[in-house]
Image (cartoon, grey):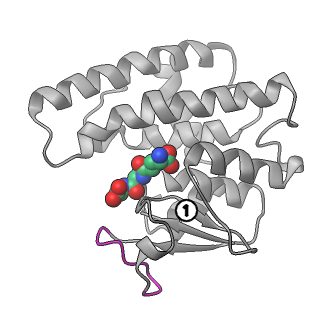
Amino acid sequence: MKLYFLAGACSLATHICLIEAGIAHEAIAVDRQKRTADGQDFLTISAKGYVPALVLDSGEVLTETAALLPYVGELNPGAKLIPVPGTLGHFRVVEWTAYINSEIHKSFTPLFRPGSSEEMKAAARELVLRRLVLVESTLADRPYLTGSDFTVADAYLYVTLSWSGRAGVDISGLPRIVEFLSRCSTRPSVQAARKDEGLPA
Ligand SMILES: N[C@@H](CCC(=O)N[C@@H](CS)C(=O)NCC(=O)O)C(=O)O
């Protein structure tokens, strides 16, 4: 399958999970002008125009991080990226993925938008930190969001936290989150995906 990505963007979560799950894939960069590294107009692949987009071996195109992450996780149950469908454990991972998608990822958006005023950015930083309080308390008794297994939700949380420095969100007052970030950074899948995307280690 083919993953279309923007270096370091939310698509990095799907990229990490493809590697964790051992799924054969080709990762293809998309630039800000919506040209792909292999010379296509990205809008002809996904009319939504944003990453991630996953082109399956059947040619079907799947988009939306909240769909791609469980999809990739379920491709290889042995990788334990998401518990078996139909179980409460499965929906816990879906619950966290939805929270990160709508409450954390999207709270960062004004921090990367060129037209955002300083007031909008300050409000966004405050909101991100408020949303992270729940994450900090959850990590009090476990290394990852739902326990001892690194799941697709952890990959997504890692990616959003990796934006904090560039976005000016000071996470130093959240020690378990700081530890989580460095724990994830040492995972071979995270290091490999970052390298593939041309990001610093
Ligand atoms: N609803 C989508 C949003 C994806 C999204 O925000 N993608 C951003 C990167 S994190 C993007 O492609 N931005 C470039 C653009 O919109 O032109 C999802 O959750 O996957």
Q: Is residue 150 above or below residue 127?
A: below
Q: Nearer the viewer, residue 68 or 174?
A: 68
Q: Is residue 23 above or below residue 70?
A: below
Residue 174 visible, this angle: no
Q: Is residue 37 above or below residue 4?
A: below
**Dominant secondary-structure state across the stretch colored magenta:** loop
Tag 1's secondary structure? Answer: strand
Circle 1: is it few (<14), some (14-19), or many (20+) Cα within 10 Å?
Answer: many
Three-letter amino acid code at disc 1? Ala
Dividing the picture into quadrants, the one containing residue 173 is top left
Q: How many marks?
A: 1
The part of the chain drawn in magenta is 32-39
| 9 displayed left or right of 67 | left
| Residue 99 x, y percent position in the rendering | 54, 27
Residue at numbered disc 1 = 53
Q: Is residue 172 magenta?
A: no
Q: Nearer the viewer, residue 128 or 60?
A: 60
- Taking the view exactly as shown, the residue that stands out farthest to the bottom is 39
